[in-house]
Structure formats: structure tokens, C-alpha cells
Image (cartoon, rainbow, N blue to C red):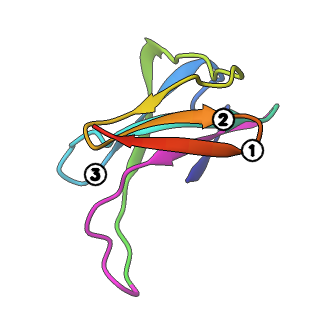
Amino acid sequence: MIYIDHQIVPRGRTAGIYDTNDQRLPAQAVSYRADGTYWAVWLDDIPAFGFKKFLVRQLNEENGTISKEAPTLLENKWYKITPDYSGGIHPFVV
């Protein structure tokens, strides 16, 4: 997770995060504050005790809003999860 100040990427805009090969990384806004937004970013091949450089740019597209609603279903190609908000979850293998 990274924190990007709203002076770099204004609130409501999408952050374009690129590696050194100019490949855009998958990123999603997770939460925000008055001065910046926290972004979840998928990073590959970070060397142990090393680093990689990334470039952050503002894209001209609008960012989706962060939903505060409780989801009724979470699903991917391996799992389907129905949250039980009384205190548990019920997994079903797809």
C-alpha cells in the first residue's frame, strides 16, 4: 500500500503507477484523507533487501468511488464467499 498526496494525484482522479518498462501496474484506491489517498498496488519481483523505482502520474480518468456498503458476495475464479455480518463467513468452492 502506498500513500499519494493530493498535490500529485488529486482526490477523485486515478493514479497511474508505472515500472521502468513503462508498464502500468494494477492499483486501486483504498481509503483517503484530506491531504492524500492510500492506494493498493500489485508489485512483482521486488528483490530481497533491494528496491525498484516506480513512476506515479495522474491519469485523466475519474476514479471510482470507494464504496462504504457492505458487500453481499465476494467472488473470484476459485472462491465464492457470502459474508455473514452476524459474525462469520460461509465459503463455497466454485
| Secondary structure under the numbered disc 2 in the rendered image | strand
Say whether marks 2 and 1 touch (CB < 8 Å).
Answer: yes
Q: As rendered, which of 67 and 11 lies closer to the eye?
A: 67
Identity of the residue furthest to the right in this view: 34
Q: Where is residue 77 shown, x and y percent of the image?
A: 25, 37
In percent of the image, x 67 and y 25: which residue is there?
Answer: 70
Task: Identify the residue at image location x=57%, y=52%.
Answer: 2
Numbered tag placed on residue 33 in the rendering: none
The amino acid pointed to by label 1 is Gly
Number of marks in picture: 3
The residue beneath circle 1 is: 87
Q: Can residue 3 be seen by looking at this rendering?
A: yes
**Residue ID for mark 2:** 84
Is residue 87 part of the magenta span, yes or no? no
Dividing the picture into quadrants, the one containing residue 54 is bottom left
Element under disc 1: loop
Identify the residue position indicated by label 3 in the image: 19
**Residue type at the position of mark 2:** Asp
Give the magenta range.
35-49
Q: Is residue 91 above or below residue 28?
A: below
> Is 37 covered by the magenta stretch?
yes
Q: Residue 8, can we see it? A: no
C-alpha distance separating marks 3 and 2? 39 Å
Q: Nearer the viewer, mark 3 or mark 1?
A: 1
